[in-house]
Amino acid sequence: MATGGSNEDDYLSTCGICFIKYDLLMNRPKVLPCSHTYCFTCIQAMISSGNPLKCPMCRKTAVGIDKVESLPNNVHAEHIILLNEKLEKAEAEAKLSSKLLDAYFKSNKSECQVFVVTDDHEPKVLSFNASKDAVNHFHHTSVKIPDTEKPTKLRIISWQGFMVNDIPAFPLLMTSLVNILKAQNPDVVFLYNVEPATLDRLKKNLPSFKFIYEFNDQMSVTLLNTSVSYDSHEAVQLPVEESGDYNFLIVEAHVGSLKLKLINAEIDMYASDMWRENFTKLMLDKLGKESDATANIILRMGGCCDEQNWHTYTRDVGLPHRTVDVWEACKKPGMCNLIWRYDNMTETDVLEYKNFNGKLPYIDHYRFSRVYLRPAKTVFAQPKFYGEIQFLNITLAIHSAIIVDFDISSTFCLS
C-alpha cells in the first residue's frame, strides 16, 4: 500500500490528511477502494463537499460511496490502536508502581511518617504527630488528602449553537470542538442545542469531563473538568412555546474554597419576542435575587436578539448589584483574537492568536453570547481575559466560541 506518512508505522497510526492519530471513534481508519487509508472525519469532509470522492494519494475516484460508514475499517491500523492503548496503560501502571514503592520506602524510614494514596491515585507521604486514638481511627477510616496545589485560573469556554448534526460541516465542527477542548483544557464548558447522538460522541471523545444535563431532544449541557468538584444541579423548566420546550441548567460546584453556581441558558431565536424578553428579564432578575452570597454565580446566556431590544431589557431590569458583564470587565474587546483555522487543502486545523485591524463582518451578533459574573462576598473569581474563536473556511458562523479566564489565585473581599 502507498502511504500518506513517512513510513509504514506512520501510515498505520496517523491519518495522511489531517496528521491526527487514528482512534476508534471520530478518527477511526477507513479504507478507500484504492486501498489507501484515511480517518472517518476527513473522508466525511470530502464526501460532504459535493465533489467526486478522490483519493488524495493516487487520485483515483471512489464510485458509489455516499456514506463513510459503508467503507471498511483498516483492521491492521485498529490493531495498532489497541496495542498502543495497552502499552500506554502498562506504562502508566509501571510509573504508578514506581511512585508507590518510592513513597512506601520513604515512609518506612521514619516513625513519624505514613504512606497513603489519594483519591486521584497519587502516592503521598505524610508527616504528623498524633495521639494513639487518632492513629487507631486513621486505620479504620478512609482519609481524603487535600490537593496542596492551589489553582490560579478558572477557564470557561462557551460554545455557540451549531451542534445540530445535519449540517454539512458538522463532522469538522465536532472535530474542532474536541481538539479545542483538549488543547485549551477548560475547567467549565457550556453547550446548548446538543442532540443525543452528539452528546454520546462527545462523551466518548472527552472522557476526563463530567457531563451534566437533563435528557431531552436538544439539551443544555455543562461540562466540568477534573479540576472542578461537582456538588449538585437543577434543570428549571420554562413555559412551553410553539417552537419548543425550553429549560435552563443550574450547576453548583467548587474549586477548592471557591464556590460556583453555573447557569447555562439560551435565548432561543425561534421563540416569540415576548418569550425572549420575559426570559432575559427572568435571568437578570435571578442574578439579583440569588441569596447565596458565598457562591460565584456565572451566567452564560446564548442566543439571538437585536441590540435595541437588549438595551431595553437591561435598562428595564438593570444589572443586579455587584453583577458585571465579563466582556465589559475585560475592557470590551471588540475584535476576535483567537482563530481556529481550517485548511481546505490539507484538512488540518490549528488554534492561533491574532489581532485584527478592523471589525469582523456581522459584528452586531458578537455580543449576544454573554457571560455575567455575580461574585461572592468572600472568595471570588476576578475576570481577566475575554476572547472569541472565529472559524475560517468551515461555516458562515463568524464566531463560534468564547473563552473567559478568571483569576482565582487570591482571596478577594468585597465590601
Image (cartoon, helix red, strand yellow):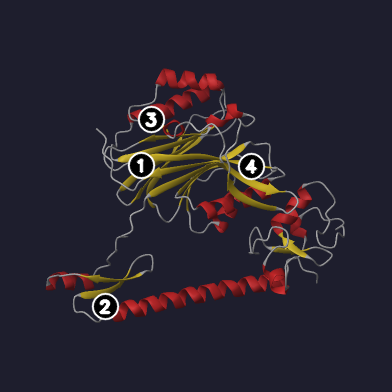
Name the residue carrying label 1: 381
Name the residue carrying label 3: 286
Q: Is residue 171 left or right of residue 215?
A: right
Give the residue displayed 73% in from the left and 73% down from the top. Answer: 8
The disc labelled 3 sits on which kind of residue? Lys
Callout in the foreground (4, 3): 4
Residue 311 placed where, x, y %? 48, 20
Tell me which numbered mark, 4 or 3, is placed earlier along the sequence: 3
Callout in the foreground (2, 3): 2
Residue reaching furthest to the front: 357
Residue 62 placed where, x, y %? 85, 58
Quadrant in which the C terminus appears: top left
Is residue 351 among the parts visible in the rendering? yes
The disc labelled 4 sits on which kind of residue? Phe
Q: Are marks 4 and 2 in contact (CB under 8 Å)?
A: no
Residue 226 placed where, x, y %? 42, 56
The disc labelled 1 sits on which kind of residue? Ala
Q: What is the tally of numbered marks visible in this picture?
A: 4
Q: What number is the disc on residue 107? A: 2
219 or 351, which is in the foreground? 351
Tell me which numbered mark, 2 or 3, is placed earlier along the sequence: 2
Q: CA distance from mark 1 to mark 3?
A: 19 Å
Q: CA distance from mark 4 to mark 2?
A: 53 Å
Q: What number is the disc on residue 119? A: none
The disc labelled 2 sits on which kind of residue? Ser
Q: Is residue 105 left or right of residue 88?
A: left
Give the residue displayed 33% in from the left and 33% down from the top. Answer: 290
Q: What number is the disc on residue 391? A: 4
Dot 2: what SS?
helix
123 or 17, which is in the foreground? 17
